[in-house]
Image (spheres, coloured by chain):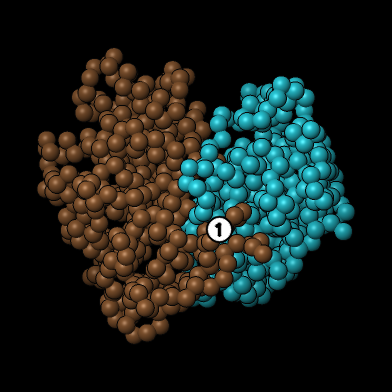
Amino acid sequence: MINDKKKPILEIKNLSKVYRTKRSIFGDSGNDVIALDRISFKIFEGEIFGLVGESGSGKTTAGRLIVKLEEPAEGKIYLENVDLTGLKGKGLRAFRRKVQMIFQDPYQSLNPQLSVLNTVSEPLTVHKIGNGKTRQGLVRQAMKSVGLSPPDDYLHRYPHQLSGGQRQRVAIARAMVLNPRFVVADEPTSMLDASISAQIFNILSDMREKLDLTILFITHSLAAARYLCDRIAVIYRGHLMEMGPAEEVIRNPKHPYTQALIDALPKFGDCGDIKHYGTLLRADSEALGGAGCPFYPRCRVAHRTKCCTGMPRLEEISDSHLVACYYALPGSEIVTEGDACFYAT
Amino acid sequence: MALLEVENLSIGYRTRKGYLQAVEGVSFCLEEGKSLGFVGESGCGKTTIGMALMGLLPPNGQVTKGRILFEDKDLLQLSDSNMRSIRWQKIAMIFQAAMNALNPVHRVDDQVAEAIQAHNPDLGKTNAMKQVEGLFQLVGIPEDRMRDYPHQYSGGMKQRAIIAMALACRPKLIIADEPTTALDVIVQDQILKETRNLQREFNLSMIFISHDISIVADVCHDIGIMYAGQLVEYGSREEVFRSPCHPYTRALISSYPTLTGKKSQLTPIPGETPNLINPPAGCRFCDRCPGARTSCKTEPPAWEEVGPCHSALCHERKL
């Protein structure tokens, strides 16, 4: 549910990021990979915003730009109305306290030589918060909040003594110990068992409730995004394709790519009224050099010249539901087909 | 007649901390052209079963009980050289983390050709290459990418190459161990569709091993739910999902996010899996089971028929 009265905590305007591939010694200029192409969105205070897309879609790049692990090629990011572009010194330190990141792979994001206590208290040391004793108190509190209790059982363990789910909880505790305002969670459950994922989802949504936290949740699964997020943005090859309230985007997806993502999710049990859209062409896509819609080569719906010559703008089709597709506008909708469920009768 | 029959299979590992019973008393059978899926959390023994079927258990692992009947031959009684003639020619495996299963310094087509030639030494290089071409076509790798190195492939293409390699000797049974874990949804969907088509085309039997219940639900005819080294529920896909019997199966299903249903219904399974070096005497799931009674702690449960092709290992059914 979006509340218009809520103020945006994060605002992204025309953000682009280009990666240059290696130039050859013969003066070949190499290829530029456009990871993000002028995307804009706002995240409101206290919401969980889902960024959904395939690998290579630019979703992780967006997360890394927001926490300032990388610098954008173009565009601005505002956190609480402060422009992040030229942030230095004190301002940057304050920003790093406010914004934290949870990485994808807890097997690689934890230092194997640091005990849990040292891992979780490191941010406190870096930001010179408290002394030895008070730090331990804060660490214990953070660990309890992620369900690692009693903390004494875990404080002196090393990452190799923990299971995957426990490691990711330590990583979350490390992000939470500074009491940040905004957290970027980059596929926090993709390396974990499906049954452990539910625990991590619940921890994140608890955090949001208790600490009034705002979360950017990056994932490739619409099902996970639906469970956790208030709003979802679907990203494809650096372009935002669809954005809107989570339930609306899943019940009523307008962009063929969103529909393809829904088709691709394995379904079991009660599929309710989820439809099979069949909008994805099997052909693997190559990015179009031209100006067209990036999804055009894989899209079954689009076969007209319009789609390969101009990128459709992200337009509002109903209350806060935005779509970038010529065929999503009222009157030119796509016909859906079939039932998604394998044993539907 | 069943292609593969496994009876009362138990596998253990000798570890520094003691003897670990990784798999205990697992029985199942697989018809020709059918697929069977094993689902469970990491450490439940599903990969160990796959490795035992291939005869590739690590040196500290040992089958302690049971029989593996493949085409009426007990694989456990075969000599190493006889096993080698079955492995890859009759039973092939798609290993976990296929990303790392390709050799980075050899071209992909050479690697697949090498696998073919290893099992058909008489086959010339050119003939082997011809077969590779056919295989790559089958799994959807474009011809002009055949001579690439693995690092030039995307994750999905590497997975396809690995599947091509598993198909190289036209096996009867393919064991796929977490074949799509590192892939994202659309590629995963394509690979699963591909495997289903290949299975139909060659009348392959398949064993899918995954922690993701939705993948197994998507591709398998029969499903076995594993917990702490034991099979706890076994049955046809429709039966198991329509009326899950074992509390663990129900917990697995309700901890999985789907596109429908109420959002608040996602409930993680509390607690942790028991230590298999000293497994509990009674039901292994009883500490995490919402409906556990005192008798569950002491008495090991027995298999109960729930339906015509559906059974579960739980005390609850006796009531």
Count of numbered marks: 1
Visible residue check, residue A261: yes
Quadrant of residue A311 within the rendered picture: bottom left
Q: Position of residue B280 (x, y in %)?
A: 70, 24
Above or below, B305 relative to A115: below
Image quarter where the C terminus of chain A lies is bottom right
Q: Colour of chain B?
A: cyan
Residue that appears at 78% across and 54% down: B30
Visible residue check, residue A68: no
Alpha-carbon neighbours of circle 1 within 10 Å: few (<14), some, or many (≥20)? few
Q: Position of residue A109 (x, y in %)?
A: 38, 38
Residue that appears at 29% across and 14% down: A133
The one of B80 and A73 positioned closer to us in this rendering: A73
Q: Position of residue B122 (x, y in %)?
A: 73, 69
Residue that appears at 45% across and 19% down: A150
Residue that carries the numbered disc 1 in the rendered image: A272
Residue that appears at 55% across and 55% down: B180
The one of B39 and A42 positioned closer to us in this rendering: A42
Quadrant of residue B64 within the rendered picture: top right
In the structure shown, which secondary structural element does the residue marked by tag 1 occupy? loop
The one of A300 and B239 positioned closer to us in this rendering: B239
Left or right: residue B267 compared with residue A40: right
Left or right: residue B302 compared with residue B246: right
Say which amino acid is labelled 1: Gly
Q: Colour of chain A?
A: brown
